[in-house]
Amino acid sequence: MLCFSAGGGGGGGAGATSGAAYEVGGGLTLRRVSPTGPVKANELLDLGFELDGPGRAPVDALQAYMGMAGHLLILRDDLNVFAHVHPMGTVSGRMAGMPAGHLTMTPEEHAKAMAAMSRIEGARVSFPYGFPAAGRYRLFVQVKYRDTIRTGVFDMEVQPGRS
């Protein structure tokens, strides 16, 4: 098992935070804005994060990072769960949202559909995810702002849910 211990948010990447805010350097803070209550296994959640500037107000807008508003890596402390999640869901989830004939789309049609999925408005990014089991998880959230990738590290305790 990995030892997930909160070390406080530091722009240098030392430790994680079990709280709702992580300093990502440059006077910026990545905040976890949802969910606000207890997290239970087997429930679909909106894992929401927002990038705040030095005055604690949301930044003007995030930039696309590898075609998305952000990326989320999730790791359980026993290494039995690893997930790479996108704002539109995982690859299979994104493909479900493609037009029924996506296999016969022209390259131009495909590029247009992918561009629509990478539109970014504001400083918030959300990821749909359901934790498969109770346990301690570490979340690595990456967003791009002013041409720099910012990474927040959050620890989350997931309670048993419905089976």
Image (cartoon, grey):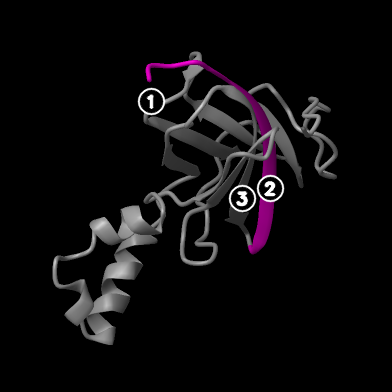
Q: Which residue shows up at 37% across the image and 30% down it?
A: 44
What's the amino acid at mark 3?
Gln
Q: Which residues are magenta?
A: 147-163
Give me the disc on residue 140.
none
Q: Residue at x 25, y 57 (%)?
A: 96
Counting other residues with Cα less than 10 Å from the Cα at mark 2, is it few (<14), some (14-19), or many (20 or more)? many
Labels 2 and 1: the sequence-earlier one: 1
Q: Is residue 30 magenta?
A: no
**Front-lying residue, 34 or 59:** 34
Which residue carries the number 2 mark? 151
User: Disc 2 versus disc 1: distance between alpha carbons?
Assistant: 25 Å
Judged by its main secondary structure, the magenta piece is: strand
- Camera-side residue of 10 and 99: 99
Quadrant of residue 82 in the image?
Answer: top right
**Which quarter of the rendering shows the N terminus?**
top right
Residue 112 located left or right of residue 138: left
Tag 3 secondary structure: strand
What residue is disc 3 on?
142
Q: Which residue is mark 1?
A: 43
Please tell me which of labels 2 and 3 falls first in the chain: 3
Report the amino acid beneath label 2: Thr
Q: Position of residue 56 (x, y in %)?
A: 63, 31
